[in-house]
Image: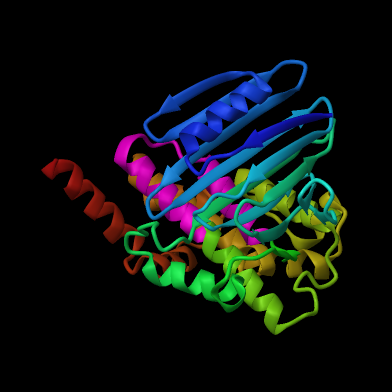
Amino acid sequence: MKTAYLKSNTIEVMFKQLKRSLGGSLKQDSNEYVLEIENEIGKGKIQGISLKGGISYLEFNMVFSDDLILSIHTTEKNPIYFTYCSKGSLSHSFGIDGEKRVLESFQTGILTSQEEDVNVLYFKKDEVLKNTLITVQTDNRTHLSGNGELKTKLRQTFFKEGTPGNFVYIGSHNLKIAEKIQQLNSITQDGIVRSLLTQGLVHMILALEIQQHTDDMKNQESCMGSLSIRDMDAIKEASVFIENNYDAQLSITELCSQFSISPSKLQEGFKLMHGRTVTDYVRDVRVCKAEELIKNTDLNISEVVYSIGFTSRSYFSKIFKAKYNCSPKEYKDSQRLMAISA
């Protein structure tokens, strides 16, 4: 069993410590770090970024060849750790001899501990792991630019009587967080645009994890309903399938058959993950694709309608206007004028 140690609250030092413990090749681009590993310890990558306001984001996308212990030393900054499993599972304890708690796929965990204490994370060997760890420094000496209210709220919620102590919360299953992490990993832009998009999505992930805790406190019954881990995997796969086959005539029956899930669970999962029914989700994916085609191709409106799987131009115009507040033709004309003026 291998043990890695993190004894810093800065991303730069964290990655140097991870490289020292796990090996691999470390790359840095501005305030982003990527540690690529392919050795006897495991294969995959660990990436992270330092954001404004005392917030950092760390993501493991790994398969370890042996069980791994990650020992995180609590600093004087009184951090709160928000962790989420998109794939695989991990366990946590306060100290190496503390009680272990398991975090499964699609669950979020929130951790605080006493100063100078140790949070221990346990990763299983030969298991595909995709896990994120958001750290928020809440000490009064940490200047959270524009986030003073957030810092105060977090301390009130997770530090009993204002004093940091050991606290662990394992939340209900949440598919929306997995979707936002996928969006974060899909960012292709560089420079300031990439930085702004990353910060916005990390803040959104953090907000969803805090909201999950709030919802669970209001309703002790699982927000997952009747969905199992296998059901949620099927829902994620169905979502990707729809995105890649938006022009096909998709039916609930066909999706249920292909992904071995009942209609009721499919609908329940889409409402949890996307906040809408399967039919509404298919329609929204098509309209978003249509907007891309109108903006980036020379197809006329009728050709766009046909290419995204619709048969009625009038119906398409109605839902396009509802989403973008203008007709497809008006949108295309505005894009043409922008291209001319440029």
Q: Which residue: 57% across, 70% down? A: 163
Question: Can residue 93 be seen in this snapshot?
Answer: yes
State the residue at coordinates (77%, 37%). 69
Residue 330's x, y, as percent?
27, 60
Q: Does the magenta run of residues contain 169? A: no
- Residue 131, relative to residue 62: is it above or below? below
Number of numbered discs on residues: 0
* Of residues 240 and 180, the one drawn nearer to the viewer in this rendering: 180
Is residue 232 shown left or right of residue 55? right
Q: Nearer the viewer, residue 13 or 216?
A: 13
- Residue at 54 percent across and 30 percent down: it is 15
Q: Residue at x 77, y 80 (%)?
A: 220
Specify whether residue 254 is in view. Answer: no
Observer-nearest residue: 100 or 263? 100
Q: Nearer the viewer, residue 57 or 190?
A: 57
Verify whether residue 194 appears in magenta.
yes
Indicate whether 264 appears above or below 66: below
Q: Quadrant of residue 40?
A: top right
Q: Looking at this rendering, what residue extends furthest in the front direction?
A: 116
Q: On the rendered structure, is 269 left or right of 339?
A: right
Q: Residue furthest left?
A: 341
Q: Position of residue 154 (x, y in %)?
A: 52, 69
Q: Is residue 73 above or below residue 231?
A: above
Q: Quadrant of residue 172?
A: bottom right
Helix, strand or loop for the magenta stretch, by majority: helix
Tell me the quarter of the image containing the C terminus: top left
Q: In this picture, which residue range is highlighted in magenta?
A: 175-204
Quadrant including the N terminus: top right
- Position of residue 151 measured from the top left corner of the image (x, y, whole percent): 45, 67
